[in-house]
Image: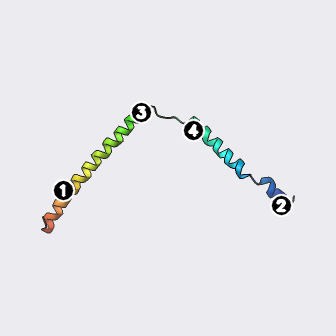
Amino acid sequence: MGDPQRRAEETAVNPIEKTRGFLTEVVTEMKRSSWPTRKELVDSTIVVIVSMVLLGVFVALADMVFLKIIGLLTGTA
């Protein structure tokens, strides 16, 4: 058995080395990643925008319909 103080010093990791190791791993992972082409990105963006517009119109229409129905049921319409 060794001195506990010495063992703690041997296993302690320098925070700068730890950060450097983390950043190296991040860069390595980013290089392995598959990035979309510009066309794929534009197409996906258009799909999201159109979907949000359609969803917004649907929610607005449903809101108006339910408002009318509740108004008729409560006699405030």
> What amino acid type should be assigned to the residue bearing mark 4?
Met
Q: Tag 2, which secondary structure?
A: helix
Give the left or right position of residue 46, taking residue 77 as reference.
Answer: right
Separation of residues labelled 2 and 4 (CA atoms): 39 Å
| Percent position of residue 46, x then y | 35, 38
Give the mark nearest the N terminus, 4 or 1: 4
> What amino acid type should be assigned to the residue bearing mark 2?
Gln
Give the mark nearest the N terminus, 2 or 3: 2
Whether residues under marks 4 and 3 lie with C-beta atoms below 8 angstroms apart, the answer is no
Q: Quadrant of the N terminus?
A: bottom right
Give the left or right position of residue 33, taking residue 74 as reference.
Answer: right
Separation of residues labelled 1 and 3 (CA atoms): 37 Å
Give the left or right position of residue 75, taking residue 41 as reference.
Answer: left
| Percent position of residue 34, x then y | 52, 34
Separation of residues labelled 2 and 3 (CA atoms): 57 Å
Which residue position is annotated with label 3?
40
Which residue position is annotated with label 2?
5
Which residue position is annotated with label 1?
65
Q: Quadrant of residue 7?
A: bottom right
